[in-house]
Amino acid sequence: MRPDRLKALCLAQNAAVEEFPFGPEYSGFKVEGKLFAITDLQATPLTVSLKCDPDEAVRLRAEHPAIVPGYHLNKRHWNTVTVGELPARMVRELIEDSYDLVVAGLTKAQRLRLDRP
């Protein structure tokens, strides 16, 4: 997967925005001000850090060498994924799962804003 595709997948999530909270080289993808993905789109290999259910995070790490505990993040809740070593469909699903976890943690008012066209 190329960096532009990874960025497009992140921005395809409802109300997702790209910001640079950790400096100009790190894209942070947020919904309602909460991060669901962090990546350096210029890095080789291309990686993305994504939120994950803690039990699922452990299972994914055990099954896929390309998924490791989140780099410089809470390793219980974040995984870092080497994008090119996994099928594109799986990367998309991991992005969607990360987004869904963040949305589930938003207030009711924030979630209602997301439902508006």
Image: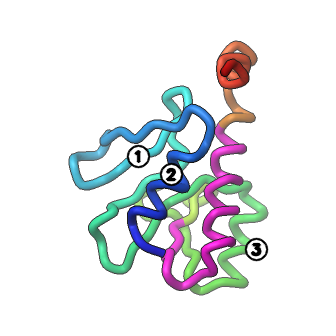
* Helix, strand or loop status at disc 1: strand
Query: Residue at point 58% right, 76% down?
Result: 67
Q: Which residue is identified by label 3? A: 59
Count of numbered badges drawn on the protein:
3
The magenta segment is: 80-102
Sequence-wise first label, 1 or 2 = 1
Residue 94 among those drawn in magenta: yes
Residue 105 among those drawn in magenta: no
Q: Do tag 1 and tag 2 residues touch (Cβ < 8 Å)? A: yes
Q: Which residue is identified by label 2? A: 37
In front: 44, or 14?
14
Sequence-wise first label, 1 or 3 = 1
Query: Mark 3 to mark 2: distance in Å?
Result: 19 Å
The disc at residue 28 is 1
Give, as a three-letter code, the residue at label 2.
Ala
Query: Residue at point 63% right, 80% down?
Result: 87
